[in-house]
Amino acid sequence: MAQCSAGPRTHEELLEVSQAYMGWPRKEGGSGICYSDALGEVERSLGQRNYTRLARAVGDFLLRWNWRFYGTKSSIDYEAIEEFVGRRASDLRFCRRRTIGSLDVGDSQQTQRVGELYYGCLIATHRVRDDAKSPVSASKALHILAPRFFPLWDNGIALGYGCMWGGLVSYGTYLEFMEKIQECRRSVLRSYVVANGGSMAGAEAALACQASAWHGYRPSLLRLIDEYNMAKFSNCR
């Protein structure tokens, strides 16, 4: 089991940082779609099996959330993203129904699926003008496609967790990062149960309910951990 020393250890710490993060002015640049709008558009497009519209939502999300890499809309290969999401739609729906708590690195079928999705996404989200690939774009695209299963991973977060990619051969490192996030999740839930009683499932629901006060919706536990990571390690202020 991967140990997590960088992320949140208690539910109080997680909620405190999430609330502070949500009060900061957003720094994402570019002209793409914001996070909450992207979530809604992805859900509608997947449900309707409209992969052209889905690719547009993913590409526009990346244009806003990794704008330093892309720069302009012409650098997004929407056709490549559409081909990827259409070809792997079944696997994406499988991951979308799950939380990161269900990750089992001992299950070769599951890790193979994650690896294939990661590398497929890495290729599909390339930068058009020079075919450069970005692990940041791959993780952010996978996150918006399955937001309770795939955590956000950028340079600052990767360094903070000791999971920095080397070149593009980064799937194993991302899987290690996912394991560390999974351990953070366990630690936060255990903290809540020790303090308040009940079950781990009840703790997750209660945390989402509390965080809805400053989100306007019930965020997943992974979303709260992502916010913690962005606040602590990313240059988002």
Image: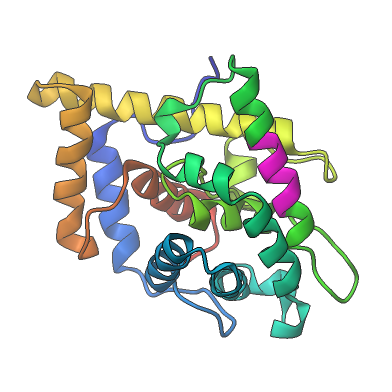
Q: Position of residue 169 (x, y in %)?
A: 82, 39
Residue closer to the observer: 232 or 150: 150
Prevailing SS of the magenta stretch: helix
In this view, 213 is above or below 222: below
How many numbered tags mark residues here? 0
Say whether residue 91 is left or right of residue 169. left
**Residue at 37% over, 35% down:** 8
**Residue at 69% over, 64% down:** 81
Magenta-colored stretch includes residue 117? yes
Residue range (magenta): 114-121
**Residue at 83% over, 45% down:** 168
Say whether residue 45 is left or right of residue 133. left
Q: Quadrant of residue 112?
A: top right
Q: Which residue is most to the right?
A: 130
**Residue at 55% over, 33% down:** 178
Q: Quadrant of residue 114?
A: top right
Magenta-colored stretch includes residue 188? no
Q: Is residue 152 visible?
A: yes
Q: Position of residue 140 (x, y in %)?
A: 58, 56
In this view, 208 is above or below 130: above
**Colouring scheme, one of rainbow, by chain, secondary structure, one colour:** rainbow
Q: Position of residue 149 (x, y in %)?
A: 47, 40
Say whether residue 6 is left or right of residue 85. left
Q: Is residue 72 visible?
A: no
Residue closer to the observer: 46 or 215: 46
Q: Position of residue 229 (x, y in %)?
A: 46, 47
Q: Quadrant of residue 217?
A: bottom left
In this view, 86 is above or below 233: below
